[in-house]
Image (cartoon, rainbow, N blue to C red):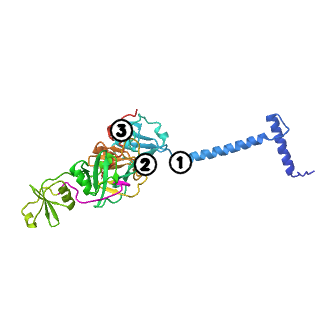
Amino acid sequence: MNSVLASTTKAQVSGHQFLTRRVEHGVVLGDVRMISDPLGSRRRAVLFGLIGTAIIAAGSGALAIFAPAVDPGDASIIRTESGALYVRANDALHPVANEASARLVVGAPEAATKASASVLGGQQRGTPIGIVGAPGIIAPHPQPELQWSAVHDGDTVTVVAGTAPAPLLDDQGLLARVDSRMWVVTSAGRAELPPEDTPLGRSMRRRLNISVDTPVWEPPGQLLSAVKELPPYREVGGTLLETGGEYWLQQDSGLLPLSELQFDIARDLGLPVRSADPTELLRFPDAVRHVAELPLAPVVWQEPARVWVLGDGKVALGGETPPGVALAGMATASAFAGPSIGAVGVDTGHGVVLVTDYGTTHRVSTPIDAVALGIVEPKPAPWPILALLPEGAELSRSAALRTQG
């Protein structure tokens, strides 16, 4: 007799699965009540764990293929992924303080090669070396030529590597005082004013309209020293000659032309005066000196609000004080405003100086050290202005090789 197998229903399959899980619960947990299904949670946890492991393994494999650990090879200057800087010296990798020290040790302006810390783990290490406080970033060659100046605004002195106002006009002047000494500052520079208790000092104050109401600029002494110094005013000797609106001083060496102001001051000092015919002047040679040490012309006294000392020793007024980096230490300058391009090498006429973008100067020991730092053609810069900044350690290879204590 033929028998026909009936198809299994969905309810039968579900019931069979339920009974199977119930048996599993009884074997594993000793509980067949099936109040909860902890084995199902465990199965799902195992499944998700396997999937996560597969993803991590695939990612690690991809990183190994597409982004392997960087090997610097025989590079002399190495920077790890964390930013740590090393320099190769004496067959060892030494932690080094900064880029300037690393270049001095190597003797060339090499760029740092990136490397993985894991690759460096098997290499011989040395003690930390370098010059603490030396520049960390040096501006690339060619470096820009900057316009250097210093601005005195209130109680602050800011050294500026950038644009500055135009200098004083010929008829403008400032009366300056440092300690007990007075100075006349004009477009030509500064000249010391004789004491007020001397005949020349009294005459000049009267002729130049200097009184207790005249505004006075009181800069730091080192800042005033950056202004070009002129010969001091002093009394002259001889005979004053007046020839129809022209003024001359007759001395043993010959005739010296005078301005009206110079003539008036010399007359105040008691020099004899006489009129002379123009033809009479032809009998005298010109004097050896060409300018008398007396003020040439009256000036209009300016208010000393925001006074600039320019790199060429002249003085300017006005403008805006650019925002700068505050300076620490005992330097005359209290701030530095310059481009944020890294340290810049300049030639002061007495050697090469590296000026950081945070306003510290570092003397470079030798021309060889300058080349190692990447300073090939340093642009000129006025030392009287740079001297206002705080000075850091001198940069030399011997100093860069010293072990940090």
User: Could you tell me which quadrant the C terminus lies in?
Assistant: top left
Q: Residue 325 carries which label?
A: 2
**Sequence order check: which comes first, mark 2 or mark 1?**
1
**Sequence order check: which comes first, mark 2 or mark 3?**
2
* Viewer-nearest of discs 1 and 3: 3
Principal secondary structure, stretch drawn in magenta: loop
| Residue at mark 1 to residue at mark 3: CA–CA distance | 39 Å
For the image, the number of numbered tags is: 3
In contact (CB < 8 Å): disc 1 and disc 3: no
- Location of residue 132 with respect to 218 vertically, above or below: above
**Sequence order check: which comes first, mark 1 or mark 3?**
1
In magenta segment, residue 116? no
The amino acid beneath tag 3 is: Ala
The amino acid beneath tag 1 is: Ile
Q: Which of 72 and 223 is in front in this view?
A: 223
Which quadrant would residue 266 be assigned to in this image? bottom left
Which quadrant would residue 274 be assigned to in this image? bottom left
375 displayed left or right of 241: right
In the image, which residues are magenta? 291-308
In this orientation, does residue 250 appear? yes
Query: Crowding at label 1, few (<14), some or many (≥20) Cα neighbours within 10 Å?
Result: few
| Residue positioned 36% across, 47% down in the render | 355
370 displayed left or right of 272: right
Q: Residue 400 carries which label?
A: 3
Residue carrying label 1: 65
